[in-house]
Amino acid sequence: MKEDYLWNKTGSDTGIEQLENALAQFRFNATEPPTLPAKILALPEKRSYGFFKLGLVFAVSLVVVGSIVWMRFTTINSSAGFGDSAKQSEVRDVPVSIPAVDSKPAIDSGPREKHFVRTVQPVRIAARPIRIVAGRSQIKTQPEKLTREEKYAYGQLMLALAITSNELKIVRDKINGREERNAADDRQK
Amino acid sequence: MPDTEMTSDLFLFAGRGGEKSAASRLVTPAARLVERIRAGEEEAFGELYKVFAPMVHGIVLARLPRDEVDDIVQDVFIAAYKNLSSLRDDNAVGGWLAMIARNRATEFFRQARQTEELIEATDTRGDSRSRAREILSAIRSCPEAYRDTLVLRLVEGMTGPEIAERTGLTPESVRVNLHRGMRLLRQKLGIEV
């Protein structure tokens, strides 16, 4: 009973009641709440950074995807030069002179047959026009506006490109030829 | 009723105890008041003051002379309003206010001890007041966990469940503190149990 009164004021307890009566003078007297200064009345709202984070993620992913697409696009452009020249490129004829190729005579003899000496005469290759196959990314130069040295450098550059192009063309033809043979063999099987 | 070990951390926020954790997930009326205060309603702050001022008053009275209590209570609520953004769980606003009140009282006590000795103003108005001071002094000499609970019960007139609700303690803790605190107080006052 006494504990009930102490806990929730159920029943009675003389001793506790006496203590309560004695201490009641110290009890809180209801007063007005403190006056709040005007400058602290506006509380900063709890910001939600959810949408901001979402937007940031979206922007970053957009940049990444755009970079990847741009890099692929430039890679495709730079590699589309020598392979598809016949369909997409522009042809220009530039007269150049190619230096002569020297070779030594070869001697071959068998024990019972007649000897034939094969000699390889130096062949002077006349200047002939070489097709320069340019890709999509053409260098937009205007040779007539270049200086003499620049024109010479330009010519040398074109020559190097032409030689490289021919070599690659040869390699490509060999690869295509080999692939055709393999395909024919597969069909026969 | 099993006796539990009294520890100084009994005066912690709500969340300890199984049944309290379930209740803390619900939005209490006090939490709604806090939401309204955050929204800028001054009236909600007044309502919060009315609900928790007796508790804050009791906690401060358990530590400081009566003459200083009213000012400290006002300071506690102004500090609480300024730092409302630091309150993580709106349901635990009572325990949070209790913590601010204790810290404020401790800080004031330290500052006051450096400058002047804290003396209760003597009053010559009869024996009743002196008896009251004697009882209050005896309560203040009790351990902190008993002290706050006894003041809230005997001075502020709050019941055990009300003390638990306002301070954020579990009802079991409050019950133990009341029981042991009352026994100790009676010993100090020389009152038979």
Image (cartoon, coloured by chain):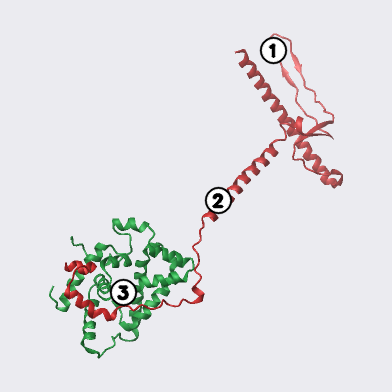
The chain letter for the residue carrying disc 2 is: A
Q: Disc 2 on helix, strand or loop?
A: helix
Which residue bears the numbered disc 2?
Answer: A57
Which residue bears the numbered disc 1?
Answer: A110
Q: Which residue is at a point 26% across and 74% down the rendered structure image? A: B151
Q: Does residue B110 appear anywhere in the picture? A: no
Q: Colour of chain B?
A: green
Question: In the image, what residue type sits under mark 2?
Answer: Val
Marks 3 and 2 share the same chain:
no
Q: Disc 3 on helix, strand or loop?
A: helix
What whole-number distance in Å separates the C-alpha atoms at marks 3 and 2? 49 Å
Q: Judge left or right: residue A27 versus residue A69.
A: left
Q: Is residue A105 above or below residue B60?
A: above
Q: Are marks 3 and 1 in contact (CB under 8 Å)?
A: no
Which residue bears the numbered disc 3?
Answer: B59
Q: Disc 1 on helix, strand or loop?
A: loop
Q: Are marks 3 and 2 in contact (CB under 8 Å)?
A: no
Q: Is residue A77 above or below residue B127?
A: above
Question: In the image, what residue type sits under mark 3?
Answer: Ile
Q: Judge left or right: residue B24 versus residue A38.
A: left
The chain letter for the residue carrying disc 1 is: A
What whole-number distance in Å separates the C-alpha atoms at marks 2 and 1? 80 Å
**Chain identifier matching the red colour in the rendered picture:** A
Q: Earlier in the sequence, mark 2 or mark 1?
A: 2
Q: Which residue is at a point 25% across and 90% down the rendered structure image? A: B125
What whole-number distance in Å separates the C-alpha atoms at marks 3 and 1? 123 Å
Question: In the image, what residue type sits under mark 1?
Answer: Gly
Label 2 Cα neighbours within 10 Å, binned few <14 / some 14-19 / many ≥20: few
